[in-house]
Image (cartoon, rainbow, N blue to C red):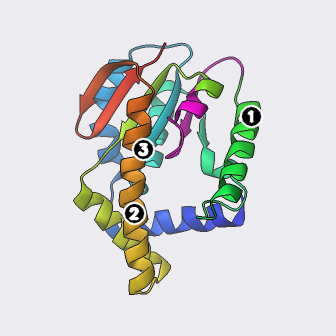
Amino acid sequence: MNDANTRKRQLDELASSLLAIDPADTERRLARFIEALGPMKELRLCVTGGAGSGKTSFTTAVSRAFGVPVYDFDEYIEGGYHPDGPAYLARLEAARQKLWLALPQEGGWLVEHVESCNEDMVKLLKPTHCAIIEPSIEYIRKVAAARSQAADDGPVLAAEREKRALESREYARMQFEKVGGKVLFSKSGTTLKKLG
């Protein structure tokens, strides 16, 4: 895990404790989603959503239910996210290739990241399904505030964190809509599509 992602994970854990998020509640809410997938030998699922949407909690619960590994795309992006335009896009492409090489050729897997359902990623990885996690804007704001509190951000950084979280929510929605597929499940801010 690179240093930027180690820090991000630590902030996420602290923010979750500040929000009093109950992992058991997450698993209960996902029961219908898991039921909609049905038994599968090779679930290959890309999960998207904005910053703070709950992708990690979601993929952890699905991983337990199906016994497949989770790949956090952040782990493959050298230096993590940084709004440096072309340099970030180059790191993103390199990360896609690293992830593709890391995924098992047989069996299932889950990939989670705001970029995981974009057209380039879907073409490369060929998932069987894509899902988007879309909690309310109020929830995204609460998570951004909790992350800012955990990071001890000042007001300017806190406002920037919230802005990026809301922008990433819209970006994830746009990418998810582009990939097509058949909607199998849509409830409580979670939508599942079967691809191909």
Q: Which residue corresponds to the image point at 52% horizontal and 45% vertical from the top-left?
A: 113
Residue 117 coordinates in the image, percent (x, y): 50, 35
Give the residue pinned by disc 2.
16
Mark 3 falls on what kind of element? helix
Mark 2 falls on what kind of element? helix
- Please identify the quarter of the rendering in which residue 73 is found: top right
The magenta stretch spans which residues? 105-122
Q: Distance between the residues labelled 2 and 3?
A: 21 Å
Q: How far apart are marks 1 and 2 (CA)?
A: 29 Å
| Residue 110 drawn in magenta | yes
Q: How far apart are marks 1 and 3 (CA)?
A: 23 Å
Say few, some or many: other residues with alpha carbon within 10 Å of mark 2 (under 14 / 14 to 19 / 20 or more).
some
Residue 93 coordinates in the image, percent (x, y): 70, 43
Mark 2 is on which residue type?
Ser
Residue 43 coordinates in the image, percent (x, y): 52, 20
Q: Can you say which quadrant of the picture contains the N terminus?
A: bottom right
> Can residue 54 be seen?
no
Q: Which of marks 1 and 3 is in front?
A: 3
Q: Which mark is residue 172?
A: 3
Which mark is first along the chain, 2 or 1? 2
Say few, some or many: other residues with alpha carbon within 10 Å of mark 1 (under 14 / 14 to 19 / 20 or more).
few
Q: Which mark is residue 102?
A: 1
- Please identify the quarter of the rendering in which residue 65 is found: top left
Q: Which of marks 1 and 2 is in front?
A: 1
Q: Which of 66 and 190 is in front in this view?
A: 190
Farthest residue in the bottom direction?
154
Mark 3 is on which residue type?
Ala
Which mark is first along the chain, 3 or 1? 1
Q: Is residue 135 above or below residue 32?
A: below
